[in-house]
Structures are given as C-alpha cells and as structure tokens.
Image (tube, grey):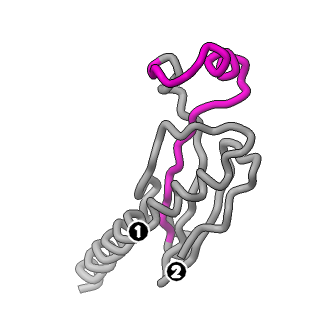
C-alpha cells in the first residue's frame, strides 16, 4: 500500500491520506527550519544562493494516525531534512511510503491501548 503521489510542485502544508484496517494515516509536509545547506559540503555556492533566495528548502514529512475523526497520534512517524524543490513530489511520496509501516504499527498499538483503557473504564 502506498500514499497517493504528492504533486510535482509539493509545498509545505500539503497532505496525502491512506485508509486501511480501520485507521486513517495522513502524511503532511512541514517546513524544516533547522537545516541549511551550509551544514554540508555537497552544495555549490550557486545551490546555496538558490536556497537563500527561496528556490528550494528543506521539509519534513509527518505521519498522523486517526480512527474515524479521532486523532490517535499526531506524530506517529516522521522524516526531516528532505531537500524540496519544485520537482520533489515523487521523492516526498517515497519518503512518506517508507514511514507508513512504522506509523501503522504505532497507530495499531495506540488503538489497542485506548481500547484496553476504555474497557477498564466500562468495567
């Protein structure tokens, strides 16, 4: 199972959703303000200048898990420091897909804990 592809021109705030086995998992793109290309030695001065102009940025993908409209986990899995330019949708989708099993397992575990807690309250 994979997320629907992010648009080629993915921006922060964009989301994609998967529903499976009673869970809705939402992948959201967030800005990553803590990473700059000056921290690495793989970027040219032109690439750094393009970053500083806002031609590209770093983002993170955060997966949240819901049951119906109830948020179970707002941060079930994430990956940060993703290079995002105006042609990054496929790569960001791939990153979200790579996190999917982690988020699904965390969501199932949280749902199980919640179910047990509700059973204790009802008893």
The answer to which quarter of the image holds residue 73 is bottom left
x and y percent of residue 42 in the render? 50, 24
**Residue located at (28% from left, 72% from top):** 113
Which is more foreground, mark 2 or mark 1?
A: 1
Q: Bin the neighbour count of mark 1 within 10 Å (Cα to Cα): few under 14, some 14-19, many 20 and up.
A: few
Q: CA separation, marks 2 and 1?
A: 11 Å
SS for callout 1: helix
Q: Which mark is on residue 20?
A: 2
In the image, 50 versus 57, the foreground residue is: 50
Q: Bin the neighbour count of mark 2 within 10 Å (Cα to Cα): few under 14, some 14-19, many 20 and up.
A: few
Name the quarter where the C terminus is drawn.
Answer: bottom left
**Residue located at (41% from left, 58% from top):** 76
x and y percent of residue 27 in the render? 56, 58
Residue position marked by numbered label 1 in the rendering:
101
Magenta stretch bounds: 39-66
The answer to which quarter of the image holds residue 119 is bottom left
**Residue located at (55% from left, 58% from top):** 94
């Amino acid at each position: 199972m994979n997320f629907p592809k992010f648009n080629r021109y993915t921006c922060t705030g964009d989301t994609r959703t998967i529903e499976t086995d009673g869970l809705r998992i939402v992948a959201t793109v967030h800005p990553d303000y803590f990473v700059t290309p000056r921290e690495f030695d793989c970027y040219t001065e032109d690439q750094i200048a393009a970053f500083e102009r806002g031609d590209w940025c770093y983002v993170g993908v955060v997966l949240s898990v819901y049951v119906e409209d109830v948020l179970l986990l707002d941060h079930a899995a994430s990956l940060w420091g993703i290079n995002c330019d105006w042609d990054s949708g496929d790569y960001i989708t791939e990153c979200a897909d790579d996190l999917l099993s982690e988020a699904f397992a965390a969501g199932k575990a949280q749902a199980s804990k919640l179910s047990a807690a509700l059973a204790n309250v009802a008893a």
